[in-house]
């Protein structure tokens, strides 16, 4: 018998309040903690936060927000909607999520990827050289990407 599980992902967008004015990033973070608490209350199985380094998203320290959620919940799994592995220090990434796993009593999950938005790579000291050849006649795409540290 297969079991269907439901999860929610967020990029922690900076949105507008009921008055139509932009809310601050600090409020966006507090709002997402409340959303995760509600998600657990209604039976959602996992709550995941993405990773971006853009002004319209507050998800650049998702593991910290997930730790705050862990302190307010007891069942829901907590993870990354994607962690951009190509710009991360692997030791720091491991310790951040191992700590999250400890404070959440084993509920941490890590989803990694290479990242589709590359504008943040220079923030980490990387130059990105990308060559992409895609065939419009097929679903195949051949990509050759290299990130080199300065």
Image (cartoon, rainbow, N blue to C red):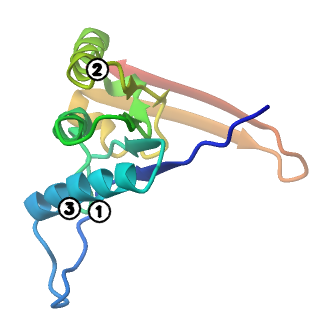
Residue 35 percent location from the top left of the image: 29, 58
For residue 129, side relative to residue 140 (left or right): left
Toward the viewer: 113 or 4?
Answer: 4
Residue 79 percent location from the top left of the image: 38, 34
Tally the numbered discs: 3
Quadrant in the picture for the N terminus = top right
Q: Which residue is mark 1?
A: 13
Residues at marks 1 and 2, CA–CA distance in whole angstroms? 28 Å
Q: Element at badge 3? A: helix
Q: Which residue is mark 3?
A: 31
Residue 118, quarter of picture: top left
Residues at marks 2 and 3, CA–CA distance in whole angstroms? 23 Å
Q: How packed is label 3: few (under 14 Cα within 10 Å), some, or many (20 or more)?
A: few
Q: Element at badge 1? A: loop
Residue 39, quarter of picture: bottom left
For residue 75, side relative to residue 21 (left or right): right
């Amino acid at each position: 018998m297969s079991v269907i599980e439901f999860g929610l992902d967020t990029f922690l967008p900076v949105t507008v309040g009921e008055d139509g004015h932009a809310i601050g990033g600090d409020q966006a973070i507090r709002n997402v903690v409340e959303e995760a608490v509600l998600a657990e209350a209604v039976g959602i199985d996992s709550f995941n936060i993405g990773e971006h380094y853009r002004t319209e998203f507050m998800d650049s320290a998702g593991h910290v927000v997930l730790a705050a959620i862990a302190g307010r919940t007891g069942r829901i799994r907590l993870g990354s909607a994607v962690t951009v592995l190509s710009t991360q220090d692997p030791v720091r990434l491991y310790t951040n999520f191992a700590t999250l796993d400890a404070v959440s009593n084993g509920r941490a999950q890590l989803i990694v990827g290479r990242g589709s938005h590359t504008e943040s790579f220079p923030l980490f000291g990387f130059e990105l050289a990308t060559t992409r050849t895609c065939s419009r006649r097929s679903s195949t795409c051949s990509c050759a990407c290299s990130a080199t540290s300065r």
